């Protein structure tokens, strides 16, 4: 397959030294160059998509190699390439459609296992539309296959979180099964796993029929490990606190403290990050300015500034975030909250 392009290596001052090779050596070199299996091709494409360096020749080479080995792809390889295409520079529409068609064929012939199915579900969150036959086949398999102890636990909660992104298409019985497995892990595991907590809270908020009893367990886990939560995780906790109405005041103990009355450099750094990432800011604002939160906490001037700056960037937000932001505004109006009173710190 070749990268860089071996056909042009001599034009760049290099040499393949082919004149020094005998026939068997040349044959072995060619075999090695073409011997990358489908799993390796998909993994390399995925890993390079997450690197800051970009080379269009590399992408073109690997797209060709993906198409050449597509008939050998399992759902795992399909998922790897689809996840790589969340990077716009690695997105190729025709290849994506062919991969989805192949994945559909794999599902219709039942040539997949539980781990591959969950992995593909994780990739589905990056797709605008997933073929119905794929989701039906995966849903049926998830309902009947046993979740063994050696199954990657992270894969389970990642699949659950992804199901919430495609909730209108996925079988609710399959979601309920994945949800139960996540809750079992939450009950039995003593380690704090914020992404698992968030996946469970997301599922409860998205699917009303799921048992809400685990909200308290997930929130208790959040309380224990809040000091290690990232800024993104805290923002998501705030968002779910507005929907599920649990007390997010505990976040004041976190290292990203969004409720603080101080204006330390670290706190200001987080607020600056939120001004640059309006999607995260919307999630945080939903919790900070929710009705039950306003009644128990006085929003700080920094929060009002965040609300004002995010509102000015409404044209960059997707429709869901715009709806959340408008709901925040309506909540403020319903409690007669006057933003101008809190727009600046007292004495400034």
Image: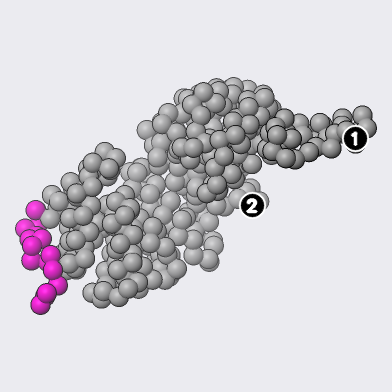
Q: Mark 1 or 2 closer to N-term?
A: 1
**Residue 185, above or below 120:** below
Q: Nearer the viewer, residue 330 or 197?
A: 330
Query: Image point 32% across, 73% down: which residue?
Result: 265
Tell me which residue sits at (42%, 63%) in the image: 230
| Magenta stretch in the rendered image | 333-348
Residue, disc 2: 149
x and y percentages locating residue 100 in the rendered image: 53, 26
Residue 326, percent across and down? 18, 46
Q: Quadrant of the N terminus?
A: top right
Instruction: Give the CA separation, mark 1 to mark 2.
Output: 51 Å
Main secondary-structure element of the magenta-colored stretch: loop
Name the image quarter holding residue 218: bottom left
Q: Residues within 10 Å of mark 1 (few under 14, many from 20)?
A: few
Give the secondary structure at mark 2.
loop
Q: Position of residue 236 (x, y in %)?
A: 35, 55
Q: Residue 265, relative to residue 41: is it above or below?
A: below
Give the SS element for disc 1.
loop
Do we see residue 217 in this rendering?
no
Front residue of this view, candidates 257 and 1: 1
Asked whether disc 1 touches disc 2, contact meaning CB atoms under 8 Å apart, the reply is no
Determine the residue positioned at 13% across, 49% down.
Answer: 330
């Amino acid at each position: 397959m070749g990268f860089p392009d071996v056909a042009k290596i001599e034009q760049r001052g290099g040499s393949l030294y082919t004149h020094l090779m005998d026939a068997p050596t040349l044959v072995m070199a060619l075999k090695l160059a073409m011997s990358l299996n489908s799993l390796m091709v998909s993994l390399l494409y995925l890993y390079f998509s997450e690197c800051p360096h970009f080379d269009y020749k590399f992408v073109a080479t690997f797209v060709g190699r993906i198409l050449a080995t597509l008939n050998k792809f399992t759902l795992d390889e399909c998922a790897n390439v689809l996840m790589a295409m969340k990077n716009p520079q690695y997105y190729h529409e025709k290849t994506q459609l062919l991969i989805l068609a192949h994945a559909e064929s794999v599902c219709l012939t039942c040539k997949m296992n539980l781990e591959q199915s969950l992995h593909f579900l994780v990739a589905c969150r990056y797709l605008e539309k997933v073929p119905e036959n794929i989701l039906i086949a995966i849903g049926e398999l998830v309902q009947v296959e046993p979740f063994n102890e050696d199954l990657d636990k992270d894969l389970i909660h990642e699949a659950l979180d992804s199901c919430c992104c495609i909730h209108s298409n996925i079988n609710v019985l399959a979601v309920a099964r994945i949800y139960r497995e996540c809750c079992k892990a939450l009950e039995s595991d003593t380690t704090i796993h914020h992404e698992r907590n968030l996946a469970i809270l997301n599922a409860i908020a998205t699917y009303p029929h799921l048992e809400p009893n685990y909200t308290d367990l997930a929130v208790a886990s959040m309380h224990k490990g809040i000091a290690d939560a990232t800024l993104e995780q805290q923002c998501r906790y705030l968002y779910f606190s507005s929907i599920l109405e649990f007390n997010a005041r505990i976040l004041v103990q976190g290292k990203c403290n969004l409720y603080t009355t101080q204006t330390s450099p670290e706190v200001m750094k987080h607020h600056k990050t939120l001004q640059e990432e309006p999607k995260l800011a919307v999630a945080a604002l939903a919790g900070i300015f929710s009705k039950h939160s306003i009644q128990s906490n006085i929003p700080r001037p920094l929060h009002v500034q965040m609300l004002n700056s995010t509102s000015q960037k409404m044209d960059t937000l997707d429709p869901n975030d715009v709806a959340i932001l408008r709901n925040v505004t309506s909540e403020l109006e319903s409690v007669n909250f006057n933003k101008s009173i809190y727009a600046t710190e007292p004495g400034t």
